[in-house]
Image (cartoon, grey):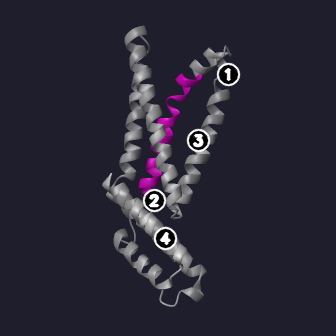
Amino acid sequence: MTILKKIFSMGTICEQRLKERDAEKIAALKMYLMERMGAPAGLHTAGIPLILSGFLSLFSFVIPQIPFWTHAFSWLNLPPQAIFAGIIPTGIIYCALLFSSMSFCARGYAVAFKFYLVMILLTACMAACNLIYAVFTALFSGANTALVISAVAAVIFSAGSYKLINSQMFLQTSAFYLHNRVWRWQLAHPANNKAR
């Protein structure tokens, strides 16, 4: 949690400095972010932690969809063969929200990172609920063990997704994203930026 607090703190400072539009403070912020970033090239500058986190979150989201929509369609007395009418639109919406938040996060927007974090935490809650459901179903109605195994995998994927964004490497990645946002601001405002 300490690393996430540092990431939020960097994002808040960056937003404040860009609103103030003070070239000297922005130049100092850029240097601060360069120090936090570490090496100018590496896995963190390629965005590997965010990309892997996004894919793990996506896998964690996908796994509970079949049991969820099977029961939803059964409850609504709809044909079970039509579950993809629920799975596909839900998956498209989730992917659109997930990958757009990742894109804006990579552009250095702190709000996008908060939204992304909320998404992966909600996905983790869904995976945990699916695991509880799978375990109870297996215990009391002798369900297929594949349901339990897939539910455990979804929880592991969610934990991995969270671990990747709560890592030192992602702290460096965030500093890189924020640094690039500050740099873009400097390039867009050359008149305000005498000491770049």
Mark 2 or 4, closer to the camera? 4
Q: Is residue 99 magenta?
A: no
**How far across and how far down the image is residue 70, in percent?**
58, 20
Question: What kind of residue is marked 4?
Answer: Gln
Mark 1, residue position: 82
Q: CA distance from mark 1 to mark 2?
A: 38 Å
Is residue 168 at all visible to an observer of this figure? yes
**How far across and how far down the image is residue 156, in percent?**
37, 36
Rendered position, 21 above or below 50: below
Q: Earlier in the sequence, mark 2 or mark 3?
A: 2
Q: Earlier in the sequence, mark 4 or mark 1?
A: 4
Mark 2, residue position: 47
Q: Secondary structure at mark 1?
A: helix
**How far across and how far down the image is residue 191, in percent?**
59, 88
Quarter of the image for residue 44 reads bottom left
Span of residues in magenta? 47-69
Mark 3, residue position: 94
Residue drawn 38% across and 50% down? Answer: 164
Q: Residues within 10 Å of mark 4 (few under 14, many from 20)?
A: few
Residue drawn 60% across and 79% down? Answer: 188
